[in-house]
Image (cartoon, rainbow, N blue to C red):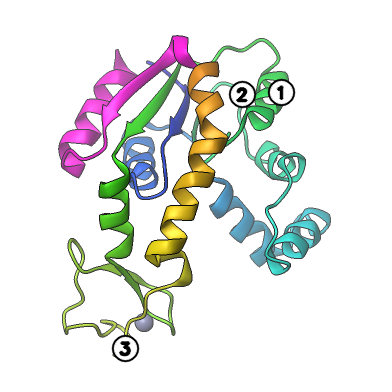
Amino acid sequence: MKTKIIFLGPPGSGKGTQAQMVSKDLGLNHISPGEIFRRIIKENNPAEIAEKIKFYVQSGLLVPDEIVFEAIKLVLDKKNFLLDGFPRNLNQAKLLEEFLDGELLDVVIYFNISDEEIIKRLSSRRSCPKCGRIYNILTLRPKKENLCDDCEVELIIREDDKIETIKKRIEVYKKETASLIDYYKKILIDVDATESIESLTNKIKSIILS
Ligand SMILES: [Zn+2]
């Protein structure tokens, strides 16, 4: 079984959802920078890293690669990981490689999806401004039209999910990851991110188990 895995894919490709399911089913350590950041900030531990992350997030700046990796190293087991959302550029890939100290990655799974499909998926997202719960008017509708199931508050479209912002996010993503696709080409396996969630989970599991 493969145990040193990277999921690579644009926002909206569903790789986070797949990473959660696959890691749970196969006993892999799912590592997502976003989740680690939230936990570090919430627990204020380690306080030094929490301070740094808060500074960048509150200033609306990208957290620098070195700080992202400091946070990831806190939980990274060199022999068992499913990385989701890291590395996102060549510099991060090199930090990871140094840290792994000769341990080779087993596979990079690339979530293939067209720009049109990403735009369709992300622009269908709605969020509750009160509790932050995410809905999708195509796939995950609230019980009452445009109202949060929990709070009964009118749902909104977050800035991140507006079409102009989505297009910018796709551009940034492409610029950053084009070099990664080339860097990992020998161990990269493409999957079709538009397949149903269940069939994609099965496909990915069979790649990892083979
Ligand atoms: Zn709510």
- Report which quarter residue 122 is drawn in: bottom left
Q: Earlier in the sequence, mark 3 or mark 1?
A: 1
> Residue 103: horizontal and vertical position, in percent?
61, 12
Q: Residues within 10 Å of mark 2 (few under 14, many from 20)?
A: some
For the point 30% across and 83% down, the residue is 150
122 and 142: which is toward the camera: 122
> Residue 169: horizontal and vertical position, in percent?
48, 52
- Report which quarter residue 37 is drawn in: bottom right
Q: Does the magenta portion include 94?
A: no
Q: Earlier in the sequence, mark 1 or mark 2?
A: 2
**Which residue has dot 3 on it?**
154
Q: Are marks 1 and 2 in contact (CB under 8 Å)?
A: yes
SS label for mark 1: helix
116 and 137: which is toward the camera: 116
**Which residue has dot 2 on it?**
78
Q: Report the amino acid beneath label 2.
A: Lys
Which of the image's four quarters has the C terminus?
top left
For the point 43% across and 72% down, the residue is 158
**Nearest-to-viewer mark from 3 and 1:** 3
Q: Which residues are magenta?
A: 184-210
- Report which quarter residue 199 is drawn in: top left
Q: Is residue 89 left or right of residue 74?
A: left
Q: Are marks 3 and 1 in contact (CB under 8 Å)?
A: no
